[in-house]
Image (cartoon, rainbow, N blue to C red):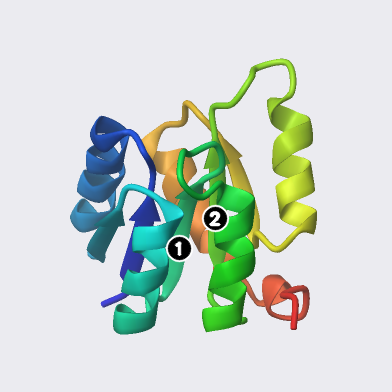
Amino acid sequence: MRHALVIDDDAVFRGVIERILVASGYTVALAEDGRHALRKAQEQKPDIVITDILMPEMEGVETIFRLREVDPDVPILAISGGWPDQQASLLKLVGRLGATETLPKPFRAKELLAAIEKCFAPRHASERPV
């Protein structure tokens, strides 16, 4: 059973993602910001991290950098509902800065699960930063 760490400052959205993942056979840990997520990542060693980009306390980009220090190989799915006119550019940038895959909010359950599976695809193994 795969273990996911979900990071989002919106409790309702975290809960929605958790329900989707649990229904798909994952165990899930939740964090409301990057600081809490880093502690959980060190303790629990997730198989995948799903993180929002725009959060208080510690933004998603910094969270991704710090997660890469903890585990350089963990797949990271970056999600963002950000500013609609800048969302695509933000997600593209985050992909270049260490996210394995990106997904714009809002999304459907099947889109989330498809993006997660892309994170585990062999092509990403050679693209992950060292």
Q: What element does badge 2 sit on? A: strand
Mark nearer the N terminus (2 vs 1): 1
Q: Nearer the viewer, residue 42 or 28?
A: 42
| Residue 104 spot, x, y in % from top left | 58, 33
Is residue 70 depicted above or below 31 in this figure?
below
Name the residue rendered at 48%, 51% in the picture.
Answer: 51
Is residue 99 depicted above or below 32 in this figure?
below
| Residue 92 spot, x, y in % from top left | 77, 43
Q: What element does badge 1 sit on? A: strand
Q: Nearer the viewer, residue 114 or 47?
A: 47
Residue 71 visible in the picture: no
Q: Nearer the viewer, residue 74 or 70?
A: 70
Name the residue rendered at 76%, 80% in the picture.
Answer: 126
| Residue 79 spot, x, y in % from top left | 54, 42
- Say few, some or many: other residues with alpha carbon within 10 Å of mark 2 (under 14 / 14 to 19 / 20 or more): many
- Say few, some or many: other residues with alpha carbon within 10 Å of mark 1 (under 14 / 14 to 19 / 20 or more): many
For residue 115, side relative to residue 34 (left or right): right
Name the residue rendered at 62%, 47% in the picture.
Answer: 102
Q: Image quadrant for the C terminus?
A: bottom right
Is residue 48 depicted above or below 102 in this figure?
below
Q: Amino acid at mark 1?
A: Val
Question: Label 2 to label 1, Cα distance in Å?
Answer: 6 Å
Q: Which residue is mark 2?
A: 77
| Residue 116 spot, x, y in % from top left | 49, 57
Q: Image quadrant for the N terminus?
A: bottom left
Q: Nearer the viewer, residue 58 or 90?
A: 58
Q: Which residue is mark 1?
A: 49
Marks 2 & 1, CB-CB < 8 Å contact? yes
Name the residue rendered at 66%, 77% in the picture.
Answer: 122
Q: Amino acid at mark 2?
A: Leu
For residue 89, side relative to residue 4 (left or right): right
